[in-house]
Image (cartoon, rainbow, N blue to C red):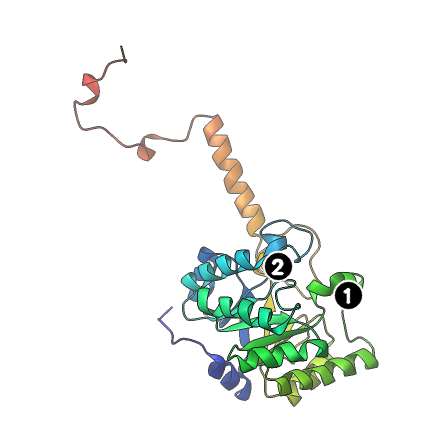
Amino acid sequence: MAQRDKLTLATLRNRKKNKTPITMLTAYDYPTAQIEEEAGIDCILVGDSAAQVVLGHGSTLQATMDFMIAITAAVRRGAPTAFLVGDMPYLSFHVNTEEAIRNAGRFMAEAGCDCVKIEGDRRIVDTVRALASATIPVMVHMGLRPQAVHQFGGYRAQGRDAGSAQRLIDDAKVMEDAGACALLLEAVPPEPARIITESTGLPVIGCGAGPHVDGHVVVVHDMLGLTSGPLPKFVKRYGDIRSQVASAVQSYAQEILERRYPAAEHCYQMEPGEAAKLHPAS
């Protein structure tokens, strides 16, 4: 792909204005970021889902600030022109606004982010306002919020009745007024997602929010088939990388057991005549 210009918030706003869909995927490491950059993905989210798909935890709650900063910086090195979103981990923005600004600032200064993402509803409006006032662009993650999974009683779609859907619609307006730069809607029916998208000037990214949003994001491990077990309803598998990797690893192990690897072409050769001068250690 030809070198592209750096994507910015202005780019995303223009995409929304022109009704050009925004592409977004997660990434957690340098080589994956390189692949997504080369494929022309617009936005990359370094999600706290890394705690699950990279570290093997049962939820996102184990992601720490230091871990998130390190992997986000790696993704930025791999994808210099993508719009990069750093995911604020559990309790990194809940204690007080000063700590939220300090932690979000680390994403911007140390990891090279273009934006941070925080999960919440109207109860975090003061944090959104404080981050925006501190010149930190903030994407608000609404609907199903994995950091609140224990409060929700599991991974459940949100806004499925009129009352809860209206709260999402109203909260989206509250977040826009507070200075949010974008919204992410997860596991939300298409109807409230459409109303939110059409009634806000903010780019709206869907994660299982139907076809009417401005763009879409899924976990890259899920869409590539790297994860095992059942997937969320909204995820489509575009590859089966897990089986390909397993086959390659099995072939490698088998060739070692059969002494077929390494072959001569995989070995470094001594200069002619030098091997004859060698003898066992005395």
The image shows residue 47 at horizontal and vertical percentages of 58, 63
**Residue 117 sits in which quadrant?**
bottom right
Give above or below for 119 relative to 64. below
* Mark 1 element type: loop
Judged by depth in the image, the label closer to the viewer, 1 or 2, is 2
Identify the residue at horizontal 74%, vertical 75% (top origin): 189
| CA–CA distance in space, label 1 to label 2 | 16 Å
Q: Amino acid at mark 1?
A: Arg
The image shows residue 184 at horizontal and vertical percentages of 63, 74
Q: Which of the numbered marks, if any, corresponds to residue 49?
A: 2
Identify the residue at horizontal 61%, vertical 56% (top origin): 63
Q: Answer few, some or many: residues within 10 Å of disc 1's Cα (few below 14, many 20 plus, some between 14 and 19).
A: some
Residue on which the image places disc 1? 156
The image shows residue 73 at horizontal and vertical percentages of 46, 61
Camera-side residue: 252 or 112?
A: 112
Identify the residue at horizontal 50%, vertical 31% (top origin): 254
How many numbered marks are there?
Answer: 2
Camera-side residue: 116 or 162?
A: 116
Give above or below for 127 relative to 265. below
